[in-house]
Amino acid sequence: MELPVEIVTLIRGYSRPRFKYFREYNRYVQLKHEWPALRTLLQTNPGPVLPVLLLFEQFMLECVASKRLFKQWNYTMPFELYQTLEQDYYHKRAKLIQVERELHLLLKEPYVCRI
């Protein structure tokens, strides 16, 4: 026995997740902090925000890895390696700040650098 089409569409509508991009938002929260405006925009209009959010996550992970290498430098390593690690870290940090600024512009909130 099958259910009528109207009931099946109602069931499908209620069985879909309410917040489709919860994984992306939770990863952002783990990297930075809670941001209710971001969550609201991901629920209502994720189109423009989602690519920038994924870029932010990628740059944040790269920046953390680069910072870890930069901080592990010791005086037995060549100075040229130190300069390379330092430049790499600050370059990735600058890209991260730029992407975070774009996120704030999309959400129409003032940007404060908290890295």
Image (cartoon, grey):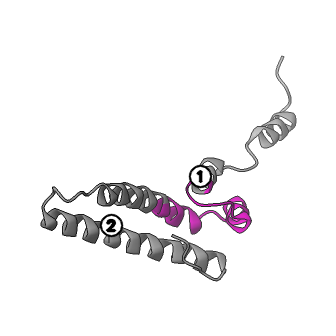
State if disc 2 and disc 1 touch (CB < 8 Å): no
- Whether 95 is drawn above or below 32: the answer is below
Label at residue 40 = none
Cα distance between the residues tagged 1 and 2: 21 Å
Front in this rendered view, residue 70 or 19:
70
In percent of width and height, residue 55 lies at 45, 62
Q: Which residues are magenta?
A: 29-56
* Front of the two marks 1 and 2: 2
Q: Earlier in the sequence, mark 1 or mark 2?
A: 1
Q: Does residue 50 appear to the left or right of 68 in the view shown?
A: right
Q: Secondary structure at mark 2?
A: helix
Kind of residue at badge 1: Gln
Q: Does residue 28 appear to the left or right of 72 in the view shown?
A: right
Kind of residue at badge 2: Tyr
Q: Which residue is the site of mark 2?
A: 89
Could you tell me which residue is drawn at 69 percent across and 64 percent down? 35
Classed neighbour count for the residue bearing mark 1: other residues with Cα under 10 Å, few (<14), some (14–19), many (≥20): few
Q: Secondary structure at mark 1?
A: helix
